[in-house]
Structures are given as C-alpha cells and as structure tokens.
Amino acid sequence: MDTHTLQIAQAYLTTEERVIVDLETLFKRHPDNKIISFLEFYMKDRKEEIKDYVILEVTDKSFDRAVSEWFRLQIAINVLRQGATYEYSTTEQGTGASL
C-alpha cells in the first residue's frame, strides 16, 4: 500500500478524541488483504452495535460513536481498496489510472 493512500485512510480513522485503528502499525506487520478483512469485521461489529442501540436507546452518546466509527471504517476501506486497485493497475498492467 502506498504512503499517500495509507495517510488518507488513516485520516478517516482518526478523530479529535482518538485513533479508531492505527493502520501504519498494522501495515508493518500484516498483508493488505488481511487488514482490509479486519476492518470489514470491525465495521460489521459496529453495525451490530448500532442495531442494538436502535432497539434500546438512540439518544445514547455511544450510538453516535458507533455510527461515526462505522461510517469512517466504510470510507477508509473504500480508500484502501481503491489504492490497492490503483497500485495493481500501475504495477501489473503498466497503466496510470487515477484514484
């Protein structure tokens, strides 16, 4: 994964209060596809939490946090997938498709 794509995805996973997932550390230790799978699993977990809050209490601050994390994870996954597609197309096919 190129540095620019990683920085964009990390920006979506960082809020004023905290870092949802530290992508740089993960990418140093794991292959791209495993990290995207982990993020998808984490996003699914947030979605289940959202469903619980909808049933119990949508005014809870934890509901807002879960929705925010789910949304940010979705965007970060899309950025990483597009970056991986871009890298594949430029290294394997020799084209310079833009993101």
Image (cartoon, rainbow, N blue to C red):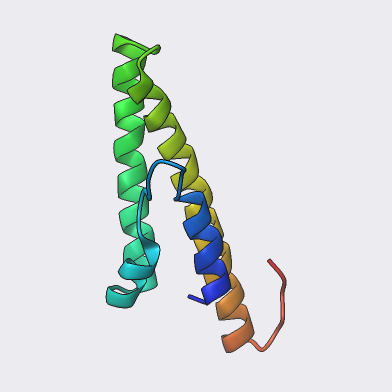
Q: Position of residue 74 (x, y in %)?
A: 48, 46
View extreme (front): residue: 16
For residue 17, side relative to residue 49 (left or right): right
Q: Considering only vertical position in the picture, is 95 above or below 15?
A: below
Seen at 27% across and 75% down, the residue is: 29
Q: Position of residue 11 (x, y in %)?
A: 52, 55
Instruction: Tell me how many marks there are.
Output: 0
Seen at 30% across and 48% down, the residue is: 41
Q: Position of residue 80 (x, y in %)?
A: 50, 63
Q: Considering only vertical position in the picture, is 67 above or below 15?
A: above
The residue closer to the viewer here, 35 or 19, is 19
Residue 91, image quadrant: bottom right
For residue 48, side relative to residue 3 (left or right): left
Seen at 41% across and 39% down, the residue is: 69
Seen at 39% across and 71% down, the residue is: 32
Look at the image and tell me whether residue 90 can be seen.
Answer: yes
Residue 36, image quadrant: bottom left
Look at the image and tell me whether residue 81 can be seen.
Answer: no
Image quarter where the C terminus lies is bottom right
Q: Considering only vertical position in the picture, is 81 above or below 44?
A: below
Q: Position of residue 56 (x, y in %)?
A: 29, 10
The residue closer to the viewer here, 14 or 39, is 14
Q: Considering only vertical position in the picture, is 61 above or below 71?
A: above
For residue 69, side relative to residue 38 (left or right): right
